[in-house]
Amino acid sequence: MHRSHTCGVLRQTDLNKDVILAGWVQRVRDKGFVLWIDLRDRYGVTQLVLDEERCDAALISQAKTLGREFVIQVHGRVIQREAKNTAIPTGEIEVLVKKLSILNTAEVPPFTLEDETDGGDDLRMKYRYLDIRRNPIKDKLLFRNKVAQMIRNFLASQDFAEVETPYLIKSTPEGARDFVVPSRMNPGQFYALPQSPQTFKQLLMVGGMDRYYQIVKCFRDEDLRADRQPEFTQIDCEMAFVEQDDILAVFEGLLQQLLQDIHGIKPTAFPRLSYADAIATYGSDKPDIRFGMYLAGLNEVAQGKGFQVFDQQEWVGGFAVEGGAAMSRKEIDSWIDWVKRPQIGAKGMVWVKCNEDGSYKSSVDKFYSQEDLAAWASACHAKKGDIILVLSGGKAQTHTQLGELRLAVAEKMGLRDPKVFAPLWVVDFPLFEQVEGDDHFHAMHHPFTAPKPTQVAQLDSSPASVYANAYDLILNGNEIGGGSIRIHDREVQEKIFSLLGFNKQEAESQFGFLMDAFRYGAPPHGGIALGFDRLVAVLDGQESIRDYIAFPKNNSGRDVMIDAPAPLDDDQLDELSLQSKA
RNA sequence: GCCCGCUUGGUGUAGAGGUUAUCAUGCAGGAUUGUCAUUCCUGCGACCCGGGUUCAAUUCCCGGAGCGGGCGCCA
């Protein structure tokens, strides 16, 4: 071993011990007659000391050659500090250096390796291995590790078995674009990387595996966002002989356990909200319920009073912002500009201030009496001192816009406290969604989702009205997981495929293996998949998932450190029977 | 595919149609008797690329590239 102790463990109780430490030079503080070196490793920082009284001149001049991030090993003795530093755990002791070995020199790093670095994202990504030496990144990776271990412990205690599923599988038409891998041995044919192990976990249920889980990479070839990576990690689970409530209970238990162990938050039952109620109340299928500001429909009180803009629209709605009457005209105008951005797409915004004296001041006073506005306030549960923000337009679109506005206003007001955790289940999703310009349905969740058992007959008569046995787990406005009870009946599955626009041959060639499996005694089953990267970030109170991934990709799907993706040699292309068009 | 923003020493930044291009940090050299983001002195080091407007462009305009954010997309 190159070391007897790490740089994070030595304390007063180790005084006078002879130790060997190894690590990176964080910083040298050279006072001339005495110099200190902060020696850093994963576990902490220990101060080394050399001075003219206690060390020979050769040793001191050797120490003066050290640069940032040199890798060194020292032999020395633990001594009491003359001036203690209470800010760090090792601050009461230091190590008097007797022998110094430079294990490796280091070039000057391109950015400072401090908690608050001066490096931009681009540079930090290119030198990710240096960034990982910094506490913020190191701690996030270790936090991820801790959460993974808790999850494994919890699921193992509930008899879940971790089973690996293949990465080289087959491309399927539904869902996201696939990443594909050419097969050398089968010219002109391709594997696809899994978007999730969905069909395999169902086959494990048919295989009698009963309770399965896997912390597993999934791949989707879609454009990225701050919180979206082309390869990401799911906690993938499936259970046999269960109903929806059984699955919700297990994974509610898992999240409760995590909140308890990580934040000491006492577990309570998670609210359950139907998809329809989530949209109506929050304008989102992943509502942030850490604060109120519930949406209210205003058609009855706002239409038919001569205000053409509202009268012509399908739906008028709004919500009250507590204390918002104090907003200046300028602030209100900036929100109006905000909702008019193309990303939101509202035509405008009407506001009503509920004054402390009980009167109302609005941007549409010309059209509405005080009594009219009082009715708005009542519908929105607005109190004196609040402001009501109102949008109008198509019903679905306006709900979404109000939902976005609600989040943005809450963010501005500091209501999205990352230390508060408000989980809930959203249930009762429609089974299908209709896409404009498409003559067949799309699966809202995925094609294997079971309809509500009482509605199976409606698949023929009115498929659009059928609800799914599907559920999403929401935490602080983030969808951290989703799942469903699956179809385990061949005939129902065939019907769904046909509604999704597959003919018999297509269904057979794409999913024949699954349909075949259903011939041989498939148990009732269902499951859930949690987005592990996002779960970890949200549990740690952060927005971006990037820092929780050791080697993430940038916005264009590039790994700037290894410079991937990259072209292939012609030889390699030939071997794969491929020709590049680029 | 589309929209918005950014690009100045190694790093992070300021700035203006004509400057010796600002500051901090870093790095190099020197000083420093208890530091801990050590302090002080001296020095080093930069306007993303292409085209246009202009007497003059790093600055204004157009295009591109890179990066970031978003829309579409992500069952």
Image (cartoon, coloured by chain):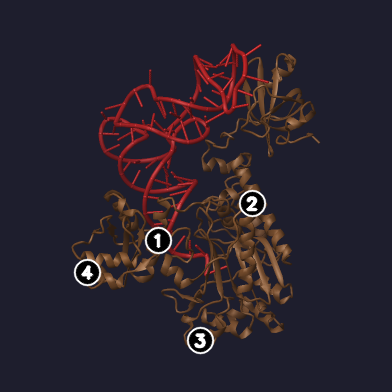
Chain colours: A brown, B red
Please tell me which residue lies in front, A15 or A426.
A15
Q: Which residue is mark 4?
A: A308
Gap in Å between the C-alphas at discs 2 and 4?
54 Å
The answer to whether residue A234 shows anywhere in this view is no
Q: Residue furthest left?
A: A366
Q: Nearer the viewer, mark 2 or mark 1?
A: 1
- Label 1: few (<14), some or many (≥20) within 10 Å? many
Are the residues flagged by discs 2 and 4 in contact, CB closer than 8 Å? Answer: no
At 61% from the left edge and 32% from the top edge, which residue is drawn? A87
Which of the marked residues, 2 or 4, is nearer the chain's N terminus? 2
Q: Quadrant of the N terminus of chain A?
A: top right
Which of the marked residues, 3 or 2, is nearer the chain's N terminus? 2
Q: Which residue is mark 1?
A: A293
Whether residue A537 sits left or right of residue A47 in the image: it is left
Residue A458 badge? 3
Secondary structure at badge 4 equals: helix
Gap in Å between the C-alphas at discs 2 and 1?
33 Å
Amino acid type, callout 2: Arg
Height in image: A268 above or below A485?
above
At 27% from the left edge and 65% from the top edge, which residue is drawn? A374
Amino acid type, callout 3: Gln
Where residue A383 appears, as percent x and y from the top left, is 33, 60
Whether residue A368 sits left or right of residue A387 in the image: it is left
Secondary structure at badge 3 equals: helix
- Label 2: few (<14), some or many (≥20) within 10 Å? many
Q: Quadrant of residue A342?
A: bottom left
Where residue A253 appears, as percent x and y from the top left, is 64, 64
Chain to which mark 2 belongs: A
Secondary structure at badge 1 equals: loop
Q: Same subunit under labels 1 and 4? A: yes
Q: Which residue is mark 2?
A: A144
